[in-house]
């Protein structure tokens, strides 16, 4: 039986999407580094009594996150966050009005998939140079093996290590489904409704849950292609166990219908 560790909490189709005013630093291959402030302007910190997960702004009043992140009744999101230990000025704090967990999510079976949720905010975020939505991929869009994408978040810097205080980014090349579903990789735990990326020294870690897998499209815009879901139970950086993300392109009909009806 595969040992899976959900990335637990630690104790859009809109115009002008995916175009950060502050360009992210993507020039070198790294295992992880502090992100340029506000270069991922759709990155959200999801908080209840304390920061729990990440999320992605996909419209002024909608945030995409992981279903397994939703364990409390009351949440707020923080936009334009960089250093969690400082209030730097541009942050926006908005309460979550409604939470929509995918109807097929089973919290006893993370490898069954459907680890995705939508949060409707009480008020619209103010879109500015530090807060902008990410683009949503087209329904069914596929990522190429080895396509460069970036995971972002404030999760642990390594298994058992401290949580980051400043937003981190790491280059995670996509691992194609044919490879990721091999028996010596994730096997049957890797579904076509998921995206595998990274592996070995490059990984998401605890606290990154719900945050985006950011992939640049051929149009130069950034798309949220994945929602950070789980890693191997032996640790965040286990060889041949890349980070597994919910594949956003699979869930576009559900996302669109939920937003339209609410």
Image (cartoon, rainbow, N blue to C red):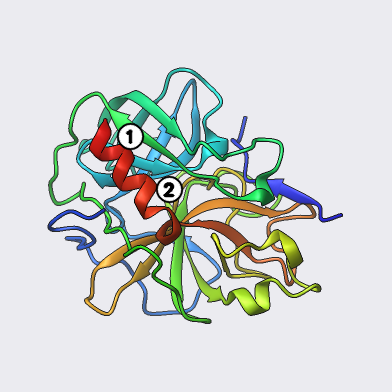
Which sits in the foreground, 248 or 4?
248
Residues at marks 1 and 2 touching, judged by CB atoms closer than 8 Å: no
> Disc 1 or 2, which lies upstream in sequence?
1
Mark 1 neighbour density, 10 Å: few (under 14) some (14–19) many (20 or more): many
Which residue bears the numbered disc 2?
166
Mark 2 closeness class: few <14, some 14–19, many ≥20 residues within 10 Å: many
Which disc number belongs to residue 69? none
Secondary structure state at the residue bearing disc 2: loop
Decide which of 217, 151 is in the foreground and name it.
217
Q: Residue at x 80, y 72 (%)?
A: 183
Residue 177 vs 75, above or below: the answer is below
Determine which quarter of the picture holds residue 236: bottom right
Residue name at image x 17 percent, y 60 percent: 21
Foreground residue among 163 and 49: 49
| Quadrant of res 220 | bottom left
Q: Secondary structure at mark 1?
A: strand
Residue 115 location in percent, x, y?
55, 45
Label 1 sits on residue:
78
Q: Residue at x 57, y 77 (%)?
A: 176
> Closer to the camera, 204 or 212?
212
């Amino acid at each position: 039986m595969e040992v899976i560790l959900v990335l637990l909490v630690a104790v859009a189709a809109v115009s002008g999407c995916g175009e950060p005013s502050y360009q992210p630093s993507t020039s070198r291959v790294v295992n992880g580094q502090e992100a340029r402030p506000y270069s991922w302007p759709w990155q959200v910190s999801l908080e209840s009594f304390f920061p729990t997960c990440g999320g992605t702004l996909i419209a002024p009043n909608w945030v995409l996150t992981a279903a397994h992140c939703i364990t409390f009744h009351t949440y707020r999101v923080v936009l334009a966050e960089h250093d969690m230990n400082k209030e730097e000025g541009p942050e926006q704090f908005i309460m979550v009005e409604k939470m929509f967990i995918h109807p097929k999510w089973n919290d006893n079976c993370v490898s069954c998939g459907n680890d995705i949720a939508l949060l409707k905010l009480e008020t619209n975020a103010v879109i500015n140079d530090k807060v902008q939505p990410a683009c949503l991929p087209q329904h069914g869009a596929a990522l190429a093996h080895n396509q460069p994408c970036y995971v972002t978040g404030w999760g642990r810097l390594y298994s058992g290590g401290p949580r980051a205080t400043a937003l981190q980014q790491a280059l995670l090349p996509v691992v194609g489904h044919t490879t990721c579903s091999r028996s010596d990789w994730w096997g049957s735990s890797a579904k076509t409704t998921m995206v595998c990326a990274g592996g070995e020294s490059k990984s998401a870690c605890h606290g990154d849950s719900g945050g985006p897998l950011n992939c640049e499209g051929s149009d130069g815009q950034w798309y949220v292609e994945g929602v950070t879901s789980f890693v191997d139970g032996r640790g965040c950086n286990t060889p041949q166990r890349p980070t597994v993300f919910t594949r956003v392109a699979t869930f576009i009909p559900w996302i669109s219908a939920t937003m339209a009806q609410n």
